[in-house]
Image: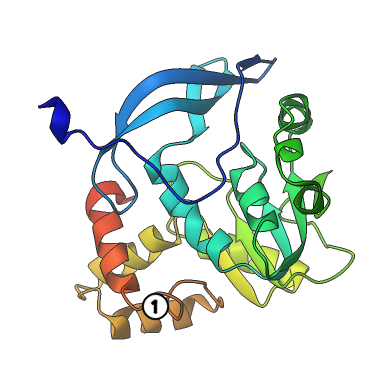
Amino acid sequence: MLNQIVIYQNEFFNPVYRPFVGERWEMRLADMVMCRGYWSEARLVMGMAALMRVSDGGKQAWMSMTPMEIESQELGCRHAHGHVVVMGLGMAWAAVNAALHPEVSKVTVVEFDPEVIAMIRQLEVVEQLPPEAAARITILQGDAYTFVPDTPADTLVADIWLPLFGPDRDKEVRRMRANTGASRVYFWGQEMVIADRARRRGLPLTAQTVDAIVAEMDLPLIGPAECPNYPDLIERAAQAWYRPVD
């Protein structure tokens, strides 16, 4: 049985995290966790870090370095270019990987919670990059829905929500795009929005269906043009993670 377990590896830069305990946030480490990916099978994750949000109701996992989290962000980082605006700092994974992309000139991160910013600085996540990549990143405290950059964005990457699926999330992203001027957009859970609209209409997830739904969303989404198998990826992700909202 043990020889059938696959240890998770990926080609991205994965920062080293340390435990952190703050007023509203905690960073935890787990020696090993079995997790499935966003569109891939389950694998064993070694030394997994997880960011927990602390509230009166308890502690909630906000982000983690699982295959699901990484795969659900990778398209935005892989196809980013120019000035990238990242809405939501989280564990800074998207920001640091965007900064390492050769076609990216600048990364502006907008984070609402100053404690998250302080945590990432204390853990020296950005400082783990080569100096020239670290210098591309600017982290600002602000509101994703109202932030307007000094220079227009070329790429917008938005990840400020829980849960993964929100039926009207594209409306929120259109507000962000209007403020930033981004020519390309990737938002967390966009595949779930597409899958939801296809399922509600009884349509198969073909390239034609995806193109029609994306056109209705009126967002220049990263994914359909960049991935020939994007409909298949959406279907695989939806089978594992789609939870309809009544």
Is 60 situated left or right of 43 in this image? right
Front residue of 155 and 168: 155
Is 239 situated left or right of 131 in this image? left
Residue hosting label 1: 213
In this picture, is 65 found above or below 239?
above
Which residue is pictured at 52% across the width and 73% down the height?
Answer: 221
Q: Which residue lies furthest to the right in this view?
A: 150
Image spot of residue 26 (x, y percent): 60, 19
Residue type indicated by callout 1: Ile
Which residue is pictured at 54% across the width and 59% down the height?
Answer: 187
In this picture, is 68 found above or below 203?
above
> Is residue 200 something that shows in the picture?
no
- Mark 1 secondary-structure assignment: helix
| Colouring scheme applied when the structure was drawn | rainbow
Q: Residue furthest left?
A: 1
- How many numbered discs sit on the rendered protein? 1
Image spot of residue 129 (x, y percent): 71, 43
* Mark 1: few/some/many CA within 10 Å (<14, 14-19, 20+): some
Is 214 situated left or right of 133 in this image? left
Which residue is pictured at 60% across the width and 30% down the height?
Answer: 16
Image spot of residue 100 (x, y percent): 67, 56
> Is residue 120 something that shows in the picture?
yes
In this picture, is 178 found above or below 187?
below
Is 116 situated left or right of 67 in this image? right
> What is the quadrant of residue 1 in the picture?
top left
Which residue is pictured at 53% across the width and 19% down the height?
Answer: 28
Image spot of residue 58 (x, y percent): 50, 15
In this picture, is 84 found above or below 245?
below
> What is the quadrant of residue 24 in the picture?
top right
